[in-house]
Image (cartoon, coloured by chain):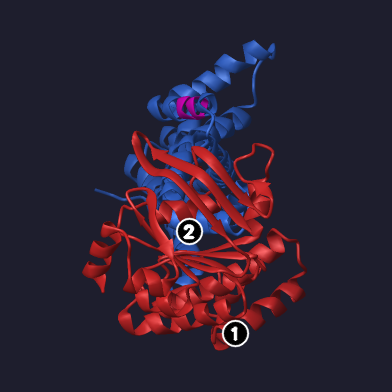
Chain colours: A red, B blue
């Protein structure tokens, strides 16, 4: 459902993505790993055009994102994103955070939006926090709300940009649990993470990036136990 | 030294008339200046450089020239251009004050908008909101809250600067003071009374600003 062809991205003179080719199938969970500065977050952010790509093609469900006639706002409704720093709206309650986009973007009635929001909160285990402000929540709770907020738009794909990197260790588990259950339900997911346990357990495919290129990809077990490329080996040696 | 409290009492009705006009002008200038300021700040953050440049020019001109010159310019300079004899000083005074405060408010809002974390805009856009929706629902409400303390300063400055409209013979509190002084020759009484009346107004205003701060901080609980 997502096809990326020869994607290039430059920040000024620095070429961060040097031609990425990738295909993500419906229902697939792809985990992107790699050292910092390898371009994995930029790659992810190109998929919903938070970073404008300079060259190449990104095709989601047949729609080319870089085509000038494409309305990116329509595409983004179908592509949910979860950020490292949660980015909840601090001036809105948890419930309002989740209801806002369905109401303003999809023009869903308030009652309906509230129903969806409450169901999602139930699902991430935070039904009792509906009416508090994000400032009162722990990091793990905030990230679960952020996941619910993205899901409220009923996206076809979910992008996760290091969703557990800003969390205290004891809160990583609760967020990963929610992501695992999403994966089980067949959600298409692209996850940039350093959680190798998650990659191994949930990932259908692991993509290793370094210096703006995809160096190696394959089944988690193969990548972790039998990496072919020397750079993959040295990266895995450092973190495992 | 004798302090003639009775003189103050005698001239209080005159001063209160001035207070009324000062309040009227200031309230309009605060309201219009806030709207102008929000608009100019958004233009200053626009992607089109000619618009940005115009907005910057507006701010630099109104911030970099004396308010009194601006009042004269509008009151005496603009009517001939429009082929009119004269403006009602109430209009020219209020317009000049509003335009002037708009420049300061624009800078306050620009700073506040730029202080909102980039992730807020990204989260809003990633949910499919347009840039305008993200500004309206996410960025501006948060920026407004951050702008309240400096806005409070600006509102108090407007109230005091409104005294400059007396130069085009508007009978505000400052002008009422000058009349009282001219008739009574009681200088201390006059200017003490005028100052205290300004102080009462600015204190009321700062109370109002504190109330706004409290109201908007309901999401700060943690």
Nearer to the camera, B186 or B194: B194
Residue A17: percent from the left, percent from the top? 41, 45
Residue B18 within the segment the image draws in magenta = no
Mark 1 vs mark 2, foreground winner is: 1
Q: Quick check: B191 left or right of A25?
A: left
SS assignment at label 2:
helix
Residue A114: percent from the left, percent from the top? 69, 76
> Can residue A16 be seen in this snapshot?
yes
Q: Which residue is mark 2?
A: B145
Nearer to the camera, B127 or A194: A194
Q: Chain of mark 2?
A: B
Q: Main secondary structure of the magenta part?
A: helix
Question: Are the residues flagged by discs 1 and 2 in contact, CB closer than 8 Å?
Answer: no
Q: Residue at x 43, y 32 (%)?
A: B182
Q: Quick check: A75 left or right of B175?
A: right
Residue extent of the magenta highlight: B52-57
Q: Chain of mark 1?
A: A
| The disc label shown at residue A123, or none | 1
């Amino acid at each position: 459902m997502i096809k990326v062809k020869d994607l290039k991205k430059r920040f000024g003179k620095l070429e961060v993505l040097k031609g990425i080719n990738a295909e993500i199938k419906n229902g697939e969970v792809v985990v992107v790993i790699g050292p910092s500065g390898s371009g994995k977050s930029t790659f992810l952010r190109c998929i919903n055009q938070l970073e404008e790509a300079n060259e190449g093609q990104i095709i989601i469900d047949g729609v080319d994102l870089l085509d000038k006639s494409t309305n990116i706002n329509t595409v983004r409704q179908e592509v949910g994103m979860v950020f490292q720093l949660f980015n909840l709206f601090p001036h809105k309650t948890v419930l309002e955070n989740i209801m806002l986009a369905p109401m303003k973007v999809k023009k869903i009635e308030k009652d309906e939006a509230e129903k969806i929001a409450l169901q999602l909160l139930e699902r991430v285990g935070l039904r009792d926090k509906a009416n508090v402000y994000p400032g009162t929540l722990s990091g793990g709770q905030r990230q679960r709300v952020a996941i619910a907020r993205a899901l409220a738009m009923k996206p076809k794909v979910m992008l996760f940009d290091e969703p557990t990197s800003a969390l205290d260790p004891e809160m990583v588990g609760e967020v990963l649990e929610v992501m695992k259950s999403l994966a089980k339900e067949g959600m298409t997911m692209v996850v940039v993470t350093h959680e190798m346990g998650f990659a191994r357990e949930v990932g259908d495919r692991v993509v290793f990036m370094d210096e703006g290129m995809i160096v190696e990809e394959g089944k988690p077990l193969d990548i972790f136990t039998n990496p072919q490329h020397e750079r993959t080996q040295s990266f895995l040696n450092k973190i495992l | 030294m004798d302090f003639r409290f009775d003189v103050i009492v005698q001239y209080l009705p005159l001063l209160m008339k001035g207070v009324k006009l000062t309040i009227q002008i200031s309230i309009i200038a605060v309201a219009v200046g806030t709207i102008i300021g929000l608009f100019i700040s958004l233009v200053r953050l626009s992607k089109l450089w000619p618009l940005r440049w115009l907005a910057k020019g507006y701010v630099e001109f109104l911030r970099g020239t004396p308010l009194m010159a601006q009042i004269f310019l509008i009151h005496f300079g603009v009517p001939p251009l429009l082929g009119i004899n004269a403006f009602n000083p109430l209009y020219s005074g209020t317009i000049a004050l509003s335009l002037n405060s708009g420049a300061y408010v624009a800078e306050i809002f620009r700073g506040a908008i730029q202080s909102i974390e980039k992730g807020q805009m990204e989260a809003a856009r990633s949910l499919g909101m347009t840039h305008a929706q993200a500004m309206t629902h996410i960025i501006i409400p948060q920026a407004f809250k951050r702008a309240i303390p400096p806005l409070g300063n600006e509102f108090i400055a407007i109230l005091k600067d409104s005294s400059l409209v007396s130069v085009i013979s508007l009978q505000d509190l400052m002008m009422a003071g000058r009349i009282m002084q001219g008739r009574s020759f009681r200088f201390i009484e006059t200017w003490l009374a005028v100052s205290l009346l300004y102080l009462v107004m600015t204190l009321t205003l700062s109370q109002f600003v504190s109330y706004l701060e409290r109201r908007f901080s309901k999401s700060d609980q943690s």
